[in-house]
Image (cartoon, rainbow, N blue to C red):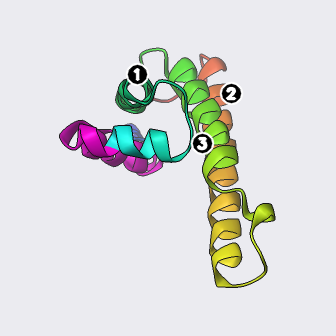
Amino acid sequence: MSPALRRALIFLGLLGLCAAYIQGGLNKLVDYPGAVAEAAHFGLPLPAATAALTIALELAASLMVLTGRLRWLGALALMLFTLAATLIANRYWVLPPGQERFMTANGFFEHLGLAGAFLLVALWDRQGARNPA
């Protein structure tokens, strides 16, 4: 595989990994009152500030991952954000058995997978010399 193709494929993989955070950050930015309402819905403190910080984190950390500038830090930030958001929003264990619990459990474990992928990106980036992107 050529180095250019390898770099392009790595970028596409990282873009796919960050896609939900870019989309989420942009949607919250465009509908800031909705982002504040979402933060309030989950009982987060200072919903307006929490929404603003969420937007900044989702977009800035995604940019860090995609550009390679402090990629490891952006990946760790998205990993921690994902874990926190998952524990807040996907508490399937408090739901009664049924479709909603099933779907929420799926979301919980999918987000654990994303967090794991961001951890791997951070570790990969910290290897330094073997980092191809």
Is residue 67 left or right of 129 when viewed as pictured?
Answer: left
Do tag 2 and tag 3 residues touch (Cβ < 8 Å)?
Answer: no
Residue highlighted by disc 3: 85
The residue lying toward the viewer, choosing from 12 and 62, is 62
Q: Tag on residue 49?
A: 1
| Residue at mark 2 to residue at mark 1: CA–CA distance | 31 Å
| Residue at mark 3 to residue at mark 1: CA–CA distance | 16 Å
Answer whether residue 67 is visible to the viewer in this image. no
Residue highlighted by disc 2: 123
* Residue drawn at the location 64% of the way across and 31% of the way down: 80
Q: Nearer the viewer, mark 2 or mark 3?
A: 3
Lower sequence index among marks 2 and 1: 1
The residue lying toward the viewer, choosing from 40 and 31, is 40
Within-10-Å neighbours for mark 3: few <14, some 14–19, many 20+ = some
| Residue at mark 2 to residue at mark 3: CA–CA distance | 22 Å
Lower sequence index among marks 3 and 1: 1
Q: Is residue 107 magenta?
A: no
Mark 3 belongs to which amino acid?
Answer: Ala
Q: Secondary structure at mark 3?
A: helix
